[in-house]
Image (tube, rainbow, N blue to C red):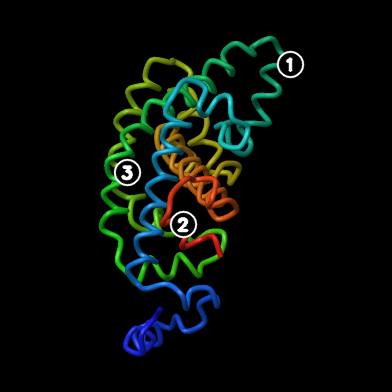
């Protein structure tokens, strides 16, 4: 049960509007539950995406060509050049799949270091609370980890160089976003977007069925 001192602490953090069930939780329980949920979600997401067809075979995160390049790809397919387009798309997704396992250690360490304040904000947060937390704390360092792996993987495909040349020109005319004009940076960003999306989905499953996780602390925090 939250003590008067703990309630004052919640108030100072602006968290007095926690759900009613949170009144039965100590700060320690809330933080432990969130850490368990985040770690479970992160590990599950990495396992799901960091394997063959983790991206290519998942419509939710599959990486396609951006903007006008996607429209141009349709024309290429119509003129019998489908193989080159498919080769590039496969390479982009394989690059993302190869990079994802590098995220596990940092995600787990980030979870272990989560503050009570952040844990409680996630408890009371909306559907994007987990995604926002991980993106805020891991996107920059993970981008640095992913980029060399993605670069190495995409260099094996000659179409990647053509992508950069065509995308750079398209960006000048506003047909492709500047951030999408480099295939390596584009794939890195999309890989991270997919990772955070899958983590959020895993967290949603835990919130929906905490009992089914078999974890006592998750049941205590989310099973109200």
Badge 3: residue crowd in 10 Å (few <14, some 14–19, many ≥20): many
Q: Which residue lies under the disc numbered 2?
A: 130
Marks 2 and 1 sit apart, C-alpha to C-alpha, by 42 Å
**Viewer-proximal residue, 183 or 146?**
146
Sooner in the amino-acid sequence: mark 2 or mark 1: 1
Helix, strand, or loop for circle 2? helix
**Viewer-proximal residue, 96 or 173?**
96
Q: Which residue lies under the disc numbered 3?
A: 142
Tag nearer the camera, 2 or 1: 2
Sooner in the amino-acid sequence: mark 3 or mark 1: 1
Horizontal side, residue 148 vs residue 70: left or right: left
**Viewer-proximal residue, 11 or 82?**
11
| Residue 78: image tag | 1
Q: Residue at x 40, y 59 (%)?
A: 33
84 lies above or below 34: above
Badge 2: residue crowd in 10 Å (few <14, some 14–19, many ≥20): many
User: Horizontal and vertical percent for residue 31?
Assistant: 35, 64
Tag nearer the camera, 3 or 1: 3
Helix, strand, or loop for circle 3? helix
Marks 3 and 1 sit apart, C-alpha to C-alpha, by 38 Å
Q: Residue at x 52, y 36 (%)?
A: 169
Total number of numbered discs in the rendering: 3
User: Horizontal and vertical percent for residue 100?
Assistant: 38, 33
Sooner in the amino-acid sequence: mark 2 or mark 3: 2
Q: Residue at x 32, y 39 (%)?
A: 104
User: Horizontal and vertical percent for residue 145?
Assistant: 28, 38
Q: Quadrant of the C terminus?
A: bottom right
**In terms of image quadrants, where is residue 183?**
top left
């Amino acid at each position: 049960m939250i003590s008067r001192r703990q309630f004052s602490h919640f108030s100072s953090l602006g968290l007095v509007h926690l759900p009613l069930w949170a009144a039965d939780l100590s700060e320690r329980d809330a933080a432990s539950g969130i850490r368990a949920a985040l770690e479970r979600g992160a590990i599950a997401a990495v396992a799901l995406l960091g394997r063959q067809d983790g991206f290519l075979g998942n419509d939710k995160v599959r990486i396609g060509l951006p903007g006008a390049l996607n429209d141009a790809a349709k024309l290429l397919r119509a003129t019998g050049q489908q193989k080159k387009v498919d080769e590039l798309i496969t390479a982009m997704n394989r690059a993302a799949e190869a990079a994802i396992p590098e995220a596990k250690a940092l995600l787990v360490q980030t979870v272990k270091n989560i503050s009570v304040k952040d844990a409680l904000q996630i408890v009371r947060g909306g559907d994007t609370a987990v995604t926002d937390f991980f993106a805020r704390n891991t996107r920059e360092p993970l981008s640095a980890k992913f980029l060399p792996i993605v670069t190495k993987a995409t260099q094996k495909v000659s179409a990647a160089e053509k992508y950069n040349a065509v995308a750079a020109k398209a960006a000048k005319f506003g047909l492709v976003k500047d951030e999408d004009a480099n295939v390596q940076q584009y794939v890195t960003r999309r890989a991270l977007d997919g990772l955070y999306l899958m983590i959020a989905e895993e967290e949603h499953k835990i919130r929906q069925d905490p009992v089914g996780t078999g974890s006592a602390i998750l049941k205590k925090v989310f099973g109200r």
